[in-house]
Image: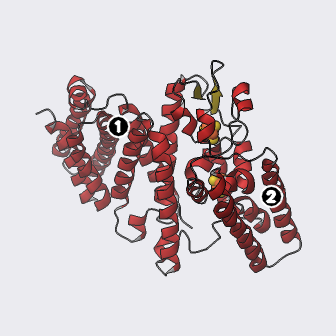
């Protein structure tokens, strides 16, 4: 019976959104009610946070309406009482959801609950900020003029909570990561394809550019403007380290797929990393020279296209045979930038001194970041992208993800929340 209170609260909020013409938000409030049927522990965190947000909505609306009525000398007492009652219902709901009854009802998967709830809320916040802070609609549901942005946010946040739960299961990440990464790449390129067919809502601004990661650094150098991608890349790398190259890059997912054609990974020699270093210098130098010489954009575009095509060849001809992600570890300049910049972020993989060097982790690392020597040193080499595959295969738990101040188990969970939220944000808003 106590569930009547939160359900009524959500219905009241839905009615308020309907009255103000926001159909998307109205549906989102109503959909929150349906989470009741899952009885999962994360729903409790999501309900309490959204009910607190809802209380602020009523407080703000109530103050505004009362001030309005008072200013025009209209009767306000009845309205005041109604708003007060609504706020009391909200507070009682929050109290019940957070209390003993709420804990007993939403009792499934308690261990994962706080992290799934955090992923839901973080994704909601990030998508809402992206939508409100851009000068044009960024969510697909709004781009088509449906006014359903909040409903889209709800479903994306639900996806984030679900994926977080899957990744936190024993051995979950090693199976889930490649799938969600490939899904992101598919959605990204499908939108580009549909955009090129003439559905302009599928394109970000209508200004096309080549989806070659090297252009993240070369583009701004050549143009002298357009720093959005480099800022996005740097902020992401500071937040989650080099995990850009194992979870978020739309091209890296292809190299991952290519390398998975082979089960037994053959690692590249150490000098292969120098090719990537050379490519980084080459890309920066060529972009700079092209800018100084005023080379027309058509030629610049053509060179980027050739660079991308060679990269594709590396995936198809080398990664597919070696099982290592050769494109990302020895060709793409952004891979190296991400490895180096990632050192500023606090995330680290550490290997326990008790490690008996069985080599299971070495055999799953598709980035060539582990060798017997690296195990001895107690950390992977520069190529590590925090993909997490090695963490899942060490039976004795001697290899960990570390974040200062946290136990390794907690660090891993926090990392999963952050990376899944970023992945879902990219899934919702990244397009060309
Ligand atoms: S190395 Fe380049 S292509 Fe590979 S994931 Fe990183 S940025 Fe993307
Ligand atoms: S060392 Fe581990 S986390 Fe780093 S790239 Fe290799 S498998 Fe992934």
Say above or below: 153 vs 195: above
Q: Could you tell which of marks 1 and 2 lies nearer the N-terminus?
A: 1
Residue displayed at 41% across by 46% down: 160
The residue positioned farthest toward the front in the image shown? 264
As drawn, is 24 to the left or to the right of 381?
left
Q: Which mark is residue 180?
A: none
| Residue picked out by circle 1 | 49
Percent coordinates x, y for residue 80 in the rendering: 21, 42
The secondary element bearing badge 2 is classed as helix
Q: Is residue 34 visible?
A: yes
As drawn, is 412 to the left or to the right of 327?
left
Percent coordinates x, y for residue 373 in the rendering: 74, 30
Q: Is residue 402 visible?
A: no
Residue displayed at 65% across by 59% down: 228
The image quadrant where one finds ligand 1 is bottom right
Label 1 – label 2 distance at C-alpha: 47 Å
Local crowd at mark 1 within 10 Å, few (<14), some, or many (≥20)? some
Residue displayed at 45% across by 43% down: 122
The secondary element bearing badge 1 is classed as helix
**How many numbered discs, if any?**
2
Say above or below: 56 vs 313: above
Pick the quarter of the image with the C terminus. Answer: bottom right
Quadrant location of residue 345? Answer: top right
Pick the quarter of the image with the N terminus. Answer: top left
* Nearer to the camera, 424 or 254: 254
| Residue picked out by circle 2 | 279
Say above or below: 147 vs 272: below
* Nearer to the camera, 366 or 11: 366
* Nearer to the camera, 75 or 385: 385
């Amino acid at each position: 019976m106590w569930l009547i209170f939160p359900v009524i609260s959500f219905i009241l909020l839905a009615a308020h959104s309907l009255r103000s013409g926001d159909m998307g938000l109205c549906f989102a409030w109503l959909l929150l009610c349906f989470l009741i049927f899952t009885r999962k522990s994360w729903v409790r965190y999501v309900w309490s946070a959204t009910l607190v947000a809802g209380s602020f909505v009523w407080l703000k609306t109530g103050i505004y309406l009362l001030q309005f009525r008072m200013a025009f000398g209209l009767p306000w007492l009845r309205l005041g009482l109604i708003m007060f009652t609504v706020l009391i219902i909200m507070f009682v709901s929050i109290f019940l959801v957070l209390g003993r009854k709420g804990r007993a009802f939403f009792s499934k998967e308690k261990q994962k609950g706080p992290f799934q709830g955090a992923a839901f809320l973080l994704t909601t916040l990030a998508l809402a900020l992206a939508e409100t802070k851009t000068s044009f609609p960024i969510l697909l549901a709004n781009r088509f003029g449906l006014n359903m942005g909040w409903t889209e946010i709800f479903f994306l946040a639900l996806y984030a909570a679900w994926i977080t739960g899957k990744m936190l299961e024993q051995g979950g990440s090693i199976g889930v990561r490649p799938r969600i990464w490939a899904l992101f790449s598919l959605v990204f390129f499908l939108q580009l394809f549909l955009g090129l067919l003439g559905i302009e809502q599928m394109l970000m601004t209508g200004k096309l550019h080549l989806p070659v990661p090297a252009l993240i650094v070369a583009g701004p150098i050549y143009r002298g403007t357009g720093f959005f991608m480099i800022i996005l890349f740097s902020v992401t790398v500071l937040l989650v380290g080099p995990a850009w190259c194992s979870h978020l890059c739309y091209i890296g997912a292809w190299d991952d797929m290519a390398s998975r054609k082979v089960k037994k990974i053959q690692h590249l020699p150490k000098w292969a990393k120098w090719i990537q270093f050379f490519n980084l210098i080459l890309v920066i130098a060529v972009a700079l020279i092209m800018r100084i010489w005023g080379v027309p954009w058509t030629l610049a575009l053509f060179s980027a296209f050739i660079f991308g095509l060679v990269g594709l060849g590396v995936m198809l001809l080398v990664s597919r045979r070696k099982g290592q992600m050769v494109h990302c570890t020895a060709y793409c300049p952004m891979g190296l930038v991400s490895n180096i910049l990632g050192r500023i972020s606090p995330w680290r993989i550490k290997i326990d001194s008790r490690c008996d060097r069985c080599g299971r982790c070495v055999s799953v690392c598709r980035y060539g970041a582990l060798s017997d020597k690296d195990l001895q040193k107690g950390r992977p080499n520069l190529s590590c992208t925090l993909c997490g595959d090695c963490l899942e295969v060490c039976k004795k738990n001697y290899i960990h993800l570390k974040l200062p101040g946290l136990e390794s188990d907690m660090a891993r969970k926090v990392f999963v929340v952050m990376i899944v939220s970023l992945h879902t944000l990219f899934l919702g808003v990244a397009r060309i």
